Structure formats: C-alpha cells, structure tokens
Image (cartoon, rainbow, N blue to C red):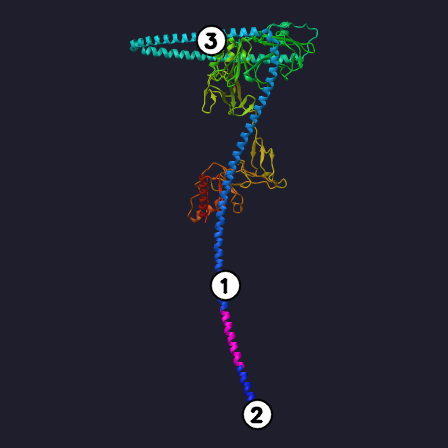
Amino acid sequence: MTMLLAIGGLGFVIAIAITLHVVRAVRRARRNEDARRRGEEESRLLTAEAHRRAEQEARLEAQRQRRVEEEACVVARQEAQRQAEEEVRRKAEEARVAAEVEAQRRAEEASRCEAESEALRRADEQARTAAQAEARRRAEEEARVAADQEAQRRAEEEACRKAEEARVAADAENRHRAEEESRRKTEAEAVRRAEEQARVVAEAEARREAEVQARVEEDKTRRKAEEEARRKSEEARVTAEAETQRRTEADLATPANSNSPVAPIRDPRQYRPVPRVPAAPAAPRSPVPASVQQEARDRAMPIEVRLVFEKAGFCRVSLLPRRAAGMPVELAVTGSGDPPELLALQDEWYQDVVVRNLERVLREGLEWAGSLPEGRRVRSSLSGRELYVLARHSELNGFVSAPRLILGEEQVVLCVAERLSEVRAAIAVTGSPEPTLLNSDSGIPAGWAGLRGVVPRTPIAPSPAGDILDALRPLAEVEIALEGGIRIDRQTWLTGFPPSVRLRGDTSTIGAVTIDGHDAALSEDGGYAVPGWDSPGEHSVWCTSGSRTYEIRGGAEDWESWDAYAWSLGESGAGGTQSRPAICGVLVRPPRVARSDGRAVVVPASNPILIGASPGEIEICTPRNDVRAGLCVGFPWFEPIWAIPADALHCDKRTARVLLIGSPQPVAEGEQQPNTRPGERRARFHRGRSGGALGWCAAILTAGRKGLQTEPSRIEIADLWTTYKRCARAIRRSWR
C-alpha cells in the first residue's frame, strides 16, 4: 500500500513535472511567437514609417515645387494684372477724355440749339408783332399810296434796269475798244521794238526802272499822307464825339433857366464826310459870344437807323433814337416826319419809330425836339445821307447804323438807287462776296436799295478829300503793343529791360512803321527796332493805324536785401531763427547758417535729397514737422539734377521714383578715376568724407540697390541714372 502510494506520488510528481515542462515549452513557444510577431510588427512599422516619411518628403517636395510654381504664377498674374490694370487705366483715361470731349461737344451743341431756338422764337415774336403793326399801317395807307408807290417802283425798276443795261453795254464796248486799242498798240510796239532793239534796250530798261521807282515812291508818299490824314481825322472825330457826349450829359444833369426862350426846331442837316487831310495848326482863339456858346452846348442826341429781318426774307427799317442819362421814360417830341411819343426801350435807347415817307427822311435827315420836366429842351437828330452802313449790335437785335464797314463782319448797306452801281463796285474792291440785293418788295423804302451779306476782307485806304463812299472802305485792324520788359509805370520801362514793339492784327496794308521818326526794321524775335529805341528817354511809335509812346528810365532807388520775414520750419522756440529762410520782396534768402550762394529749390516732400553732377554735391531739404505739406524747400549751392527719397531702402518702389529736376547733365569726371596708391587712397577717402562725396555715393547707391525707377521714365534718362550709379560704385571701390 505504501508502495502504491509512493508509486502514485512519484507518478503524480512526474506528471506534474511533465505538465510544467509542457507548460514552459508552450509558454516559450508563445514568447518566441510573440517575439517573432513583435519583430515582424516592428519591421512592418519601420517599413511603414519609412514609406510614410518618404511619402511625406515627396509631398513636401511637391508642395515646395507647387509653391514655387504658384509664386511664379502669382508673379505672372500680378504682372499680367498690373499690365491689364495699366491698360484698363489707359483705356479708361482715353474713354474719359473722349467722354469729356463728347460731353463738351454735346453741351455746346445743346447750347447752340437752345440759342438758335430762342433766337427763332424771338424772331418769330418780333416778326409777328412787326407784321401786325405793318399790316395795320399798310391797311391805313394802302388806299392812298398803293397806286403811287407801285407806279414809282415800276418806273424806278425800269430806270434801274435800263441804266444797268446801258452801263453793261458801255462797259462791254469800253472793254472791246480797250482790247482793240491795246492789241494795236502791242503790235505797233512790237514792230518798233524789233526795229530799234539794238539801239534803245539799255535806255528803255533804265527809263522803266526809274519810272517804277518813282511810282513806288509816289505811292508810298501818298499812302503815308492818306493814312496820317485818316488817323488825325479819326482822332478828331472821336474827340468831338466824346466832347459832344460829355456836354450832352452835362446839359441833361444841369437844369436850364425856366425864363430862357424856347429854341425853334432846326432844319434837318446833311451828313458831311470828314476830309482825310492833316489837321491844321491850332490858331489863337478869339472870345466866343454867349449865343455861340449856348448853340454849341445845345447838342442833339443821335438817331440811328435799324434794320431787322423777319420771316420769308422780309425786313423792317425803322429809326432808333438814343436816350441819355436823366431823360424820361416817355418823351413827347415834335418835328419833321410827325413823330409819335418816344417810349424807353433800354437805358440808352428809345423804342423804334416808323415814320411816313421814310425814303425822304433817310435822304434829307430828321430833327426832333422835346421838353424835359424841368423845362429844358432836348433835340434828336438824324443827318441825311445817300448811304448807310448797318452792322450787328451787341445789345440790340438786327443791324444798327455804324460809321464804316468792319473787316470780317456781316453787314447791310442801304443806298439810294442812283448810286447802286458805285456802291457795288466799292464793295467788290473790299473782297466781299457778292451781296444779295433787297428792294421795296423786301421792305426797303422806295427809291432805296439794300445789299445783304456784305463781309469785307481787305482793308482799303480812305479818300484824302473825304467821300461818302469812305464808309465802304474798312480800315486795317492793327494795334501797337508793347510787350515784355520790366514796367515801372503805366508807360515807363526800366533801363536795360525795354519792351518789345509789336503789331497785332492785319499788317499787310500798314506799310512803314517808324520809331522816333525813323523807319523801323523787323527783328528776329518779331519786334520792331531802330538804333537807340531802347535808350533812356521818351520814344514814339507810329504806323498808319495809330501811334503810341513809351519812356525808358532808371530805377527809383537801390537797396540791400535783408531778412524781412523769416518763416518757421517747425522748430520749437526762437533759438533756431538763424536756420530759417527769409523773404525780402521777391527774393527768397537762404538761412544765415547756410552758404550765401545757395538758391531756393522746391521739391516734393517725399524726395528731399538733392544730388548734383559732381561727387559731394548733395543737399537735404528740411520739411515742416508741425504741418502736413506736400513740398519742401532747400538751398543748394549747386545745380541740382536728381531728387532722391529720404529713406530709399524702406520706401515703396512701386510708387517712389528718382526725380529728374534739372537739365540732364553727365556726371563730372574729376572723381571717377580710382587711385591705386594707398597713401593717396586714404587721403581721397578722408577728403571725400569731409567734402560730402560719401553721402553723395551712399544716397545714389541706396536708391540703386532698391531698384527705384526714374521719372521721367525715358530710356535716355534711365541710362543717365545708370552712369551716376556706376560712378558712385567706382568711387566707393577706390576708397577700400
């Protein structure tokens, strides 16, 4: 039993040992399997990590490549966008300019259309009113004068037609005879010259030249005399008219004595042309009787002739009395033509008056008289004549009588039928296009003719003897102008700075121009000059259209400049007054601490550094610190060429520029050669630093390192800036 127990216990122990062994083997196998699995897992993880890192590096490389490509695309897009924006801005600017031009054109067109419509409306209104008045007048007078006027018109038209036919036939016959006579004379002259050519060629040529020269001199003398007479006569006429106006206004302002007798109505006067002769020397005046003085003061207000075109080419001719200051709004007058009561139209005019027998009134004249409330008499007068020139008026509609034709302006001429051929010939000489003939069917008074569309182009010298046709000879519109120089008084210029004597207007018919009685020559600058024209003293300039005087003398006084007013540069306190610029008259003086040879230069506040053509020429402008200003002032002693930004390295290169503010000058050559000797190199370095060359080079190289563009951006300006940068680099290398 014990043996069995021992064997059982031993078997149990052996079973336990085997079980433990098996368990250990299983555990070992499991550990090995786990180790193998962990190794494989670690190997797989390492491999995956390596693949992940490789893929990450590939992605990073792809991202870097993509970023580079994106940056390149962004730069390209920005450049394309900038170019597109510039193109858009350019097109927008062109479109804006075109739109402004179109808008201005449309505005002008609209204004013109509106003015034309307004003028048409007014013309229609005036035509309607005039037509109604004319209809009433014609209805009242038709029964009495229709037959007489028709018969007279037919007789005058027949007479004019026959006279015109006779004139045309006579002109044709005269031309034929003149041509035949000229042909016979030409043949005879040719035969005579052929027979005597060898003997008298030299004598005939000399005689012809002498005759031509004599005619030229004679014409020149005659023109000078005519123009001088015309000028003096015109001056006398203007003076007389001004004196008449002044006396009339004075008489209107001064009440007359109520006990003075009433002057009778005078007979109408006739127009007398002013002769074109030199004014006679003034003779001593004898005492004038009181009656003559009263008659001279009793001046008449002029009555003008007015013509207004209405519908269908019809015109209306009326009389337009002038109204002086102080005359009443309503004035009852008496005199020739059975005048109605005058009603004020404007401050200077009464309303139009249509009188009976206007054709006779225009030829013989008119005289009206009326009484003012204070008892004084006033007169209005129209001098009779056979020719009237009517021009456009700045204050009235239609055409109003004028002294003579004006160059380049459309005018209307009224004349009696007997002088129509003479008037047409005189108008043709002025270069005017053929005018339109107006007769009584168009509203012109019977016995008179109107010429519409007279536009003279050529000035004509008036007759020396005075002729009614002088009104059809327009004068040259020339003005003597004194330009330039330094004027110290109304007609006085400073010695050394005389004016330039010039003529404005049409000078083709002026002839000679004299200064101090000597014929003046035209200089290269377009002015007239003679020896001594710019010397101190009084001088006179004369031409056929007028004269003018001027004086040249020295200045009144000399003085030393001083700091009259010094303006602040933003510093606090009064201790910096020595560094302030000052103003003295028209001078801008540099600060006292600066060099005295400096001059004021104004540049943008963004570019305060001024650079000259020589190394060391540098000046920094001082901007105001207390106010915001777009400009600053500096006082360089040299001629500045460039203006550079103050902080070029940190500025925005898209907007900042290197400004060319002087004439393009190449850099001076004196400081460009490098020195290879050490002693001289050190001496040059210290000399350059003390002379400002270091700052000159630093400013240029800093702007060049930033890559700033020039303004203007032309190629030659950019090349010039490149030479400055090369010179600055060469100088910097020579100091190393």
Are there few (<14), some (14-19), or many (20+) residues within 10 Å of tag 1?
Answer: few
Please tell me which residue lies in front, 718 or 444.
444
Give how far across and how far down residue 532 sits, in percent.
48, 20
User: Residues in magenta?
Assistant: 23-43
Residue drawn at point x = 50 percent, y = 72 percent: 39
Secondary structure state at the residue bearing disc 3: helix
Measured in 3D between alpha carbons, the distance from the residue under mark 3 to the one under mark 2, in whole angstroms, is 185 Å
Please tell me which residue lies in front, 424 or 718.
424
- Residue 6 shows which numbered tag? 2
Look at label 1 and name its amino acid: Arg
Question: Given contact means CB atoms under 8 Å apart, are the residues at marks 1 and 2 in contact?
Answer: no
Please tell me which residue lies in front, 584 or 295.
295
How many marks are shown on the rendered structure? Answer: 3
- Residue 52 shows which numbered tag? 1
Above or below 14: residue 185: above
Measured in 3D between alpha carbons, the distance from the residue under mark 1 to the one under mark 2, in whole angstroms, is 66 Å
Look at label 2 and name its amino acid: Ala
Look at label 3 and name its amino acid: Glu
Residue drawn at point x = 60 percent, y = 36 percent: 567
Q: Which residue is mark 3?
A: 164
Measured in 3D between alpha carbons, the distance from the residue under mark 1 to the one under mark 3, in whole angstroms, is 120 Å
Give how far across and how far down residue 58 sits, in percent.
48, 59
Give how far across and how far down residue 59 sits, in percent.
49, 58
Asked where in the image residue 151 lies, by quadrant, the reply is top right
Residue drawn at point x = 51 percent, y = 11 percent: 470
Asked where in the image residue 261 lies, by quadrant, the reply is top right
Q: N-terminal of the two: label 3 or label 2?
A: 2
597 on left or right of 338 = left
Q: N-terminal of the two: label 1 or label 2?
A: 2
